[in-house]
Amino acid sequence: MKTFAEKFDNIEDEILFLKKERNAVLLAHYYQNEEIQDIADFIGDSLDLSKKAQKTNADTIVFCGVRFMAEVAKILSPQKLVLLPDIKAGCSLEESCKAKEFSVFKKNHPEHIILSYINCSAEIKALSDIIVTSSNAAKIIETIPKDKKIIFAPDKHLGSYLNKITGRKMLLWNGTCIVHETFSEKELIKLKVRNDDAKIIAHPECPENILNYADFIGSTSALLKFISTNNSMKFIVATEPHIIHQMKKNEPKKEFIVAPGNDGSCSCSNCPYMELNTLEKLRDCLLNLSPQINIDNQLILKAKKPLNVMLKLS
């Protein structure tokens, strides 16, 4: 008798069969590997996928990304089964901001409202007034009265960039993304000298010394839009390099170069957490309906409020 896997020609067919059996939707972030992007029903940034998670009619949501993204799907659709291919797929920004320490920080600044980047845990969201993404943060900040003090967490680089473009003086939590901190200013300059005709595009999670050289700064979805609307035929990309898969699909005649790390190579900018998800783990989570994302109902109610504010303002 054939095993389950032996009934199919390839793992992609297994996944598609199980997806239909489970009435599941596959959501994938731009930072996932190419094979996962290609089999996903929807690919997007954190804001896009948050909206898809809220609106889907599927019984099961498989979130191919990192844990905080899957938590958002569960918070917005608590009645649905939410799966994450590898439960260890975390996030350095999430890890940099623990609820116990942040709660003390919040109490020490009672006159501030809390604006939290979506790259944080459900517990931090529950302590927040508004959640933002890199796509909508500036727009949402502009809706807050100028005299209102703001705490921005957890990404200090994104917060610093937002302070610069909005003219605010938000109090910043000291968190960073390990991916965007790996880019080297010295190596970027050397690469630009060798590719003088290239435009440098960067995600605002990058440190200021990298953003200073960027011709365009934006969220993943904004970067994708820019490479299609800009006349340049060559781009140096300062964000997690798996997004280049979509860039090449959208603009096959254009050239994309990954911004280098300190050793002059680009391999160090791959997100180690995103890379934990594989086709095999995706297949297995659909087969076994595990690992599941489970969140306490009271925590869901608290974390959902600032997410709903974000969605209303977006």
Image (cartoon, helix red, strand yellow):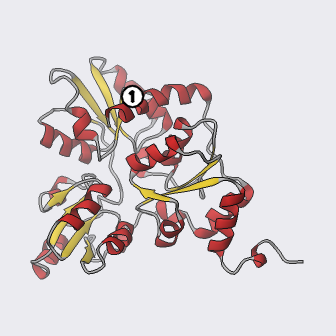
- Indicate the quadrant containing the N terminus: top left, top right, bottom left or bottom right: bottom right
Q: Is residue 92 above or below residue 187?
A: above
Instruction: Say whether residue 117 is left or right of residue 234.
Output: right
Q: Which residue is mark 1?
A: 128
Instruction: Say whether residue 4 is left or right of residue 291.
Output: right
Identify the residue at image location x=63%, y=54%: 24
- Amino acid, disc 1: Ser
Q: Is residue 86 above or below residue 198?
A: above
Q: Quadrant of residue 97?
A: top left
Q: Secondary structure at mark 1?
A: loop
State the residue in front, 304 or 291: 304
Residue 83 placement (x, y as % from top left): 62, 51
Report the residue that reaches farthest toward the top: 111
Residue 302 placement (x, y as % from top left): 50, 25
Q: Is residue 210 above or below residue 158?
A: below
Instruction: Say whether residue 85 is left or right of residue 41.
Output: right
Residue 136 placement (x, y as % from top left): 28, 42
Q: Quadrant of residue 216?
A: bottom left
Identify the residue at image location x=25%, y=68%: 237
The reply to whether residue 195 is visible in this rendering is yes
Q: Quadrant of residue 270?
A: bottom left
